[in-house]
Image (cartoon, rainbow, N blue to C red):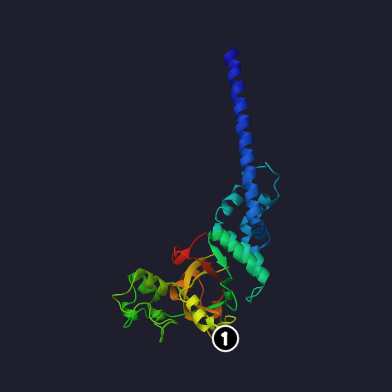
Amino acid sequence: MFWKFGKPKKQHVDFVGLKEKWELKHKTLQQDLLKKHQGALEWFVTTPKQLAATSLATMLLFVLPGGSIAATHSTQAQAFTHLDAKSFLQADLYKLLPPSVEPLSSDQEQQITTLLSRDFHMTISAEENGIRLNRNYGYIGAEQHLARFPGDMIDTHFDFPKDAGLFYNTGMAPGLGAWGYFASSEAAMTPEDNLREKWYIAVPTFLAPGYYDHVQEYSTFFKYKKMLVVNPNNGKAVVADIADSGPSEWTGKQAGGSPEVMHYLERYDGAQKGGVLYFFIHDPTDSIPLGPINI
């Protein structure tokens, strides 16, 4: 009889212990989420287009430590699962960016580069070696493909039929990039040369403070310099390199992107044009690959 009544008592003690461990884990995860993304969650609560997640986000913000989400809120919980890392980045940036696409303040630059460095696990900055661009948040325009080597043409530019189908009509730029051809000949082309042209951006290097006092130094610094380019409206990001200089101020745009960059970031000219963030990536070992990057 002792074992008959004693065994359930032991199971009950184990259950209580597991319950306490689960509640402690829940509390820890909740605190981590609040610490890292409180601004984002508040944005989900207050922004109309995120109403599908409002109920759950509110509970995550205000539920007492150790509390649990009731099963009656399963619909909201299911909606919340669709909010991926890009959604949190989008919300975090929304809290930091000015209401219009305009130059950032020093404080905004610092907060945003700290956020991007944290989320993408790399060193992001607005200034490096005393060099900076005239701005880091601006409208981006669509650029054409650049000739990679003498004789490079649109008909032979693509390695895959899918890419040709997507980007053939964007055409080739009439001139070369700011630093000429990427390779001296087709035979000399490397995979790195190919990626540099594919994932390039243009920025007005000539507007960088101090440029005309240090033309050679700045030109060397900017040549194929890696940058993180982020569309703050959808959280998509690309590691791109500076392969051209422009656009001119009169265009009303502050940067340009290759067809592949524009396609991935979902940025277009005309009525659908929008702003992007673009900051230097510190990569002295050249270990960060060009192309789309996820958090």
Quarter of the image that includes the N terminus? top right
Quarter of the image for residue 108 reads bottom right
Front position in the image: 113 or 5: 113
Quarter of the image for residue 276 reads bottom right
Q: Residue furthest left?
A: 187
- Residue 252, percent across and down? 58, 84
Can residue 50 be seen here? The reply is yes
Can residue 69 be seen here? The reply is no
Residue under circle 1?
249
Count every numbered label the image shows and give the total.
Answer: 1
- Residue 102, percent across and down? 64, 77
Front position in the image: 225 or 93: 225
Quarter of the image for residue 105 reads bottom right
Q: Please state which amino acid type lies under the numbered disc 1.
A: Glu
| Residue lying at 56% horizontally and 66% vertically, measured from the top left | 124
> Is 147 placed left or right of 143 in the picture?
left
Q: Secondary structure at mark 1?
A: helix
Front position in the image: 23 or 245: 245
- Residue 242, percent across and down? 48, 75
| Residue lying at 57% horizontally and 88% vertically, measured from the top left | 250
Within-10-Å neighbours for mark 1: few <14, some 14–19, many 20+ = few
- Residue 103, percent across and down? 64, 76
| Residue lying at 41% horizontally and 73% vertically, measured from the top left | 196
